[in-house]
Image: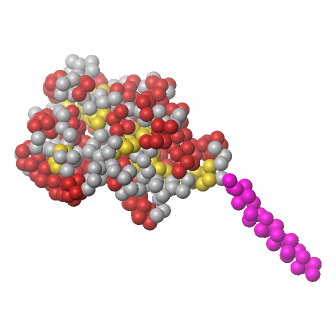
Amino acid sequence: MRAAGLAFIAALAFAAAGCAPAARDRGVTTIRFWGMGREGEVVAELARDFERGNPDVRVIVQQIPWSAAHEKFLTSHVGGSSPDVSQLGNTWIAEFTALRAIAPLDERVAASHDVDRADYFDGIWDTNVVDGVAWGVPWYVDTRVLFYRSDLLAAAGYDSVPGTWGGFREALAALKRTMPAGSDAIFLPANEWTQPAVFGQQAGSLLLSDRDTKGAYSAPEFRRGFDFYLSLFRDGYASPMGNQEMSNLYQEFARGSFAMYITGPWNLGEFRSRLPDSLQDSWATAPLPGPDGPESGTSTAGGSSLVMFRSSKHPEAAWRFIEYLSRPDVQSRFFDLTGSLPARRSAWADSALAADPRARAFRVQLERVRPMPKIPEAEQISIRLQERAEAAIRGAQTAEQALAQLDREVDQVLEKRRWLVTRQAPAGAGK
C-alpha cells in the first residue's frame, strides 16, 4: 500500500509538471513565421523582443533556404500548412496573389499607426500592389547602382559618374583610353537579365503590352535601351563574358581589370571585406545614369516583403508582428544585424546609414526604381530575356532577331494569361 501511494503521488506530480506549460501558455496565441537565409536567423532575435512587449503572442520562427523557399511555399499552400506570416520576395507577390494564398492588407494599412504608407519608397511599395490592392508590406529593399574605381575614373578626368547616357559613354571611352590594354571600362555579365531590363525601362518601355499579355521587346522604347546596352559591348567598353567566366570578381576589380560594375547592396559589405586595405579609399558608388539625365536613371525595385496568409487562424496577432517588424527603429536594428537596407525613408536617418557615403547612392536610387511586370510569369520571362540578350551580345543573333524571338517566346509563355484576361471578370474582382 505504501508503494502504491508513492506511485500515485509520483503520477500526480508528473501530471502536474506536464500541465505546467499549458497553464503558463493559457491565453497566449502562437503564430508561425517563415524567414529565408540570414534574415530568417535574425528575425528570431527580433521575435523575442516582440514577445516581451506582447506577452500574449508567441512567435515560432522557421528558417528556410532561399533555394528551397519557392517550392516550400507552394506545397504548404496546397497542403494547407502555410505559416501565419512570412517574408516573401516581392517578385513572388503576384504569383501568390493569383493563388489566393496571401491576404489583402489595404484596410489594415489604412488603420495602422506603425505602417505609414507615405514613409515607403514609392517604387518599392508598388511591387506589393496588384490590381490596385496592397498584398504585402515592404520589409527590406534591393536595387542596383554603379560600383566603380574612383581612382581610375579620376585618372580618366572625371570626379564623378555622369548622369546621362551620353556623358556615361564618354566616361567609359576615357576609361578605356587610360586603362591598360585588355582591361574593360565596365563589367556587364552577359548572362544577367537585369541590365537589359533596366536600360529598356529607362527608355520608357513597360516590357509587356496589352494588359501584360504580350511582349513589347521589339517596340521602339525597349529597342532604344537594348541598342544602348549592346553598344557598350560593340564599342569595346565591356567584354562579352558571363559571371562564370570571371575567376574572382573582387580580385579582378582590385587589379583594375574593369573599372565599373552594376550590382546590389550586398556588395557593400563584400567590397569592404574582400578588397585590400590599399583600395578602401579608391572605390565608390553612384546612381545609374539615364537617357535624359539622372531623373530618368531608374533601376530595379527588389527586396522582400512581409505577407499574411489567408489560412492564418490568428490574423490579428500576425498583423501585430508585421507592424512591429515595420517600425523604423526595428528596421534600423535589422539593418545593423543583417546589412539589408530598410524599406522606410525614416529608417535611413539611422546614423550608420546616414554617415555612409557609399550607401547614399542607394538612398538616391531608391527614389528612382520601377518594378518588373507584376505577373506570375515574370521569372520565366526574365530567363528568356537573359537568353536572347546573351545571344545578341555574343553575335549569335542580331538585335532584331533576338528581340523578335523574345517577343514570340514571351507571347507563348503568356498564352494562358491572354485567354484568362479575355474571359474573366476585371482583375482584382472578388479580392
Q: Left or right: 8 with respect to 48?
A: right
Q: In the image, 1: left or right of 300? A: right
Residue placed most toward the observer, 156 or 334: 334
Farthest right residue?
2
Report x, y in % for residue 208. 19, 45
Residue 337 screen position, x and y as percent: 51, 39
Please tell me whether the stretch drawn in magenta is mainly helix, strand or loop: helix
Q: Can residue 193 be spotted in the picture?
A: yes
User: Taking the image as drawn, is residue 38 in sight?
Assistant: no
Which quadrant would the N terminus be assigned to in this image? bottom right
Q: Is residue 45 above or below residue 23?
A: above
Q: Residue at x 30, y 34 (%)?
A: 369
Residue toward you, 229 or 419: 419
User: Residue 145, located in which quarter of the rendered image?
Assistant: top left
Residue at image location 61% in from the left, 42% down from the top: 49
Horizontal side of 44 relative to 258 (left or right) equals right
Q: Residue 87: say if magenta.
A: no
Is 331 on the left-hand or right-hand side of 218?
right
Count of marks placed on residues: 0
Residue nearest the observer in this picture, 361 or 204 = 204
Residue 225 sits above or below residue 281 on the image: below
Between 98 and 325, which is closer to the camera in this rendering?
98
The range drawn in magenta is 1-27
Q: Name the residue at 47% across, 46% down.
A: 39
Magenta segment includes 17: yes
Task: Pinpoint residue 142: horizontal percent, then vertical percent.
Answer: 36, 38
Q: Is residue 417 above or below residue 280?
A: below
Seen as rendered, the residue at the extreme bottom is 1
